[in-house]
Structure formats: structure tokens, C-alpha cells
Image (cartoon, grey):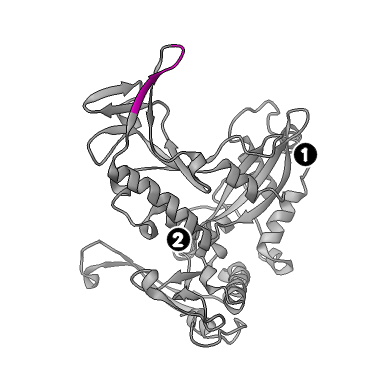
């Protein structure tokens, strides 16, 4: 446990955590929901050794993570801890519900914090299984060698790699990395970032282990991204059955770090690399504004979405709904996630989409599939210092 009632070990060396994780006998079993635990089949057993050659690179990052967590706890900000603060070593919540686990902080008794425990993050454990327990099960590119991370921390070294190419236009970067300069693919910026980092795929070893997602952002001359940032589509009937803290959206933003790489439009209308930064959503923002916005959509789906029909000047019929609009939110909003619109309202079909473009509402009507989008003006504020 990360103690709420006594001082935390300031140094990893000699700490209670070091004793617990320096050697771990890991038993990997296949869990079947509803089956008694003693009947689960064991697949693999291995000895994890933190100070082994195999984990040499991991150790440097785990030490960074420990320092990050300790600094937040000692500064009286344990209530702001989030799994997305760190890379391999996390601070997971303990207790049946987060609210029930609230306790006074040792370093800040006036503000309660959730009970948390040190843990290896799920993304790191997945890598351990795929690469250490069953070598060759999956292949990963690596950004850093064994010695690289001993010269500086992970974040600063990644940013430094990208900053070497600040100011270069997309065309210039394509020339440098032997890519077609007339490439109009939506993925070209992401491809360029991978080349800058020295990898050829998105599943680089370090990012996979740390649950880091690369997002390239194109800022227009006005300083705003042209588009909001989309996430996987929502199954509405499942969505309304969830609580926020058990939802995909909460779990994703609570555990995921982003590497935002910004390309800015210049006076010639070309986009050039402006810089990058690591970012994770502050937990207090996620659990206040984010939760309120999420609940607003849940309540609307439960209470009933109202539709209205209108026609455009060209005679095309469009269907409008009364879901909260982007202008009603600060962090994220919900809108269609489908190539074409499709509705079934009171048994009558509208739109030119397929059945696969629709999702069923609690009352039996259907509407175009929806997903959450991170607001473009919210993103603009995050990257305003780049």
C-alpha cells in the first residue's frame, strides 16, 4: 500500500516496495469469469527479477515512476494521483469503490485521498508476458538502447529526439526520411513521428509498456486544431448501464498518457513540426468536469433523446437530436462515429446509412452510432505552450 497514515519511503533503495518487487514468482493463469479460482488453468510460471539484465532498461523507468509518485504524495497531492502520471509502476486504487476508500492524507490531513497501492501497470505486464515470459510472441521496435536512459529521463529524451526536427515542414521531413513528398495520407504525420523516434510501427517497446498513445495534432493559423479527437464508438445500451468509474472513458483517461506532436500551419499554408509534449488528463478534472459531462449524456439517453426533422436547401432531409452539444461541454462531447447517417424513429427509417451505422437506444429507436470526441478548443489549450 501507499501509506496514508505514515511517512512514505523517500528513496526506492531500501524501501518496502523494493523488497516486494525485486524478485517475484509470477503465476500466469487463464481466468474464466464465474469459474472457481482453484479451477483456473495455469499457463506460465516465471521468476521476475528487477535487477536482472533483462529488466535493466525497465529499472530506470520504474525508478522515475517511484520518484513521481513519492513527490506527489509528499507534496500533499495524493488526491491528484492517477495511473496516467507514470509509465510502468502505477498507483492503483484500492477498495470496492473509490469514494468508500477515501482517507485523510498523512502529508495533507485536510484533503482526503483514495487508498492506492503500488502496482505494475497492465500495459507493462502485457509486455512482460509477450517478451520475457514467452519471448518472440510479439515483436516490438525499441526507441532506446540499454545505456540511453542512464543519461537522462525518458520524457526529456523523447522530446529531445523530436525537437531536433522542429521547424521542418512535412515535405522537408518526407525528403529527410525518404518518403514521397506528395503523400496526402492522413497517417503521414504519424509515420514521420515514428521515423523521428527511430521506429517503424506504433507499438514501440517503451510506449506499449507505458500505455502511451501518440496523437499528432495539426494546428491551423488561428491556433486551433481543425478537428476534435475521436475515440471508439459507444454501445449506448451498455453505456447507460455503467457508472462513470467503471466506464471505458474513465479507465482510458485515468491510465493513458499521450504524446502530443504538433504541426502548425505557416503563412504559406504548409504544416511544420512545432514541438511535442507528454500529457495526461488531471484526475481532479476527469472526476469533476469529465464526470459531469459523461453523466449528462447518460441521463439524456435514459430519459429519451428527442429528434427533429428538417430539410436543407438542396432538399436533403436531416435528423437533429437534443444531445448536449460541443458548446455545452469543456472536455469532451458526443457526436456521430459513422460514415453515413442512419435512424429508425417510431418504426420509420431515415438517412442513407446501413444497419451497421446505427446503434439502439434504450426505448428501441435507433440513431447514428456515437462516440466521444475530445474538444478541439480543449486540445488547443493543452498544446498552447508549444
Label 1 – label 2 distance at C-alpha: 36 Å
Front residue of 7 and 48: 7
Q: Is residue 321 left or right of residue 254?
A: left
Q: How many marks?
A: 2
| Residue 362, numbered label | none
Residue 285's spot in the image, x, y percent? 52, 58
Residue 213's spot in the image, x, y percent? 55, 51
Front residue of 179 and 251: 251
Describe the element under mark 2 as helix, strand or loop.
helix
| Residue 168, numbered label | 1
Identify the residue at horizontal 63%, vertical 55% (top origin).
278
- Whichever of labels 1 and 2 marks the residue nearer the N terminus, that label is 2
Range of magenta residues: 308-314
Residue 385's spot in the image, x, y percent? 71, 51
In which quarter of the view is residue 247 placed? bottom left
- Give the crowd class for mark 2: few <14, some 14-19, many >=20 residues within 10 Å: some
Identify the residue at horizontal 30%, vertical 49% (top origin).
240
User: Residue under circle 2?
Assistant: 126
Amino acid at each position: 500500500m501507499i501509506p496514508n497514515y505514515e511517512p512514505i519511503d523517500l528513496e526506492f533503495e531500501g524501501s518496502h516496495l523494493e523488497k516486494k518487487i525485486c524478485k517475484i514468482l509470477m503465476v500466469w493463469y487463464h481466468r474464466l469469469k464465474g469459474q472457481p479460482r482453484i479451477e483456473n488453468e495455469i499457463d506460465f510460471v516465471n521468476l521476475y527479477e528487477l535487477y536482472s539484465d533483462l529488466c535493466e532498461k525497465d529499472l530506470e523507468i520504474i525508478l522515475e515512476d517511484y520518484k513521481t509518485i513519492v513527490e506527489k504524495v509528499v507534496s500533499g497531492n495524493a488526491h491528484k494521483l492517477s495511473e496516467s502520471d507514470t509509465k510502468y509502476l502505477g498507483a492503483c486504487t484500492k477498495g470496492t469503490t473509490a469514494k468508500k476508500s477515501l482517507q485523510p492524507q498523512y502529508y495533507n490531513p485536510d484533503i482526503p485521498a483514495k487508498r492506492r497501492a503500488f502496482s505494475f501497470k497492465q500495459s507493462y505486464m502485457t509486455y512482460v508476458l509477450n517478451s520475457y515470459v514467452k519471448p518472440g510472441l510479439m515483436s516490438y521496435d525499441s526507441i532506446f538502447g540499454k545505456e540511453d536512459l542512464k543519461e537522462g529521463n525518458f520524457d526529456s529524451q523523447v522530446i529531445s529526439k523530436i525537437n531536433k526536427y522542429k521547424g521542418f515542414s512535412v515535405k522537408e521531413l518526407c525528403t529527410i526520411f525518404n518518403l514521397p513528398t506528395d503523400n496526402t495520407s492522413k497517417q503521414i504525420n504519424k509515420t514521420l513521428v515514428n521515423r523521428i523516434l527511430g521506429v517503424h510501427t506504433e507499438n514501440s517497446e517503451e510506449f506499449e509498456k507505458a500505455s502511451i498513445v501518440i496523437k499528432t495534432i495539426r494546428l491551423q493559423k488561428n491556433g486551433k486544431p481543425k478537428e476534435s479527437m475521436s475515440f471508439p464508438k459507444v454501445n449506448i445500451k451498455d453505456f447507460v448501464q455503467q457508472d462513470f468509474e467503471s466506464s471505458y472513458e474513465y479507465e482510458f483517461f485515468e491510465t493513458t498518457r499521450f504524446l502530443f506532436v504538433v504541426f502548425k500551419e505557416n503563412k504559406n499554408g504548409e504544416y511544420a513540426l512545432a514541438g511535442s509534449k507528454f500529457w495526461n488528463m488531471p484526475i481532479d478534472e476527469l472526476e469533476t468536469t469529465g464526470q459531469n459531462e459523461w453523466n449528462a449524456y447518460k441521463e439524456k439517453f435514459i430519459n429519451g433523446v428527442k429528434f427533429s426533422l428538417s430539410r436543407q436547401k438542396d432538399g436533403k432531409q436531416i435528423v437533429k437530436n437534443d444531445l448536449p452539444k460541443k458548446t455545452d461541454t469543456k472536455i469532451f462531447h458526443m457526436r456521430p462515429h459513422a460514415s453515413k447517417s442512419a435512424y429508425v424513429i417510431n418504426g420509420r427509417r431515415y438517412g442513407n446509412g446501413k444497419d451497421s451505422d446505427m446503434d439502439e437506444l434504450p426505448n428501441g429507436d435507433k440513431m447514428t452510432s456515437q462516440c466521444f470526441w475530445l474538444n478541439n478548443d480543449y486540445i488547443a489549450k493543452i498544446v498552447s505552450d508549444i
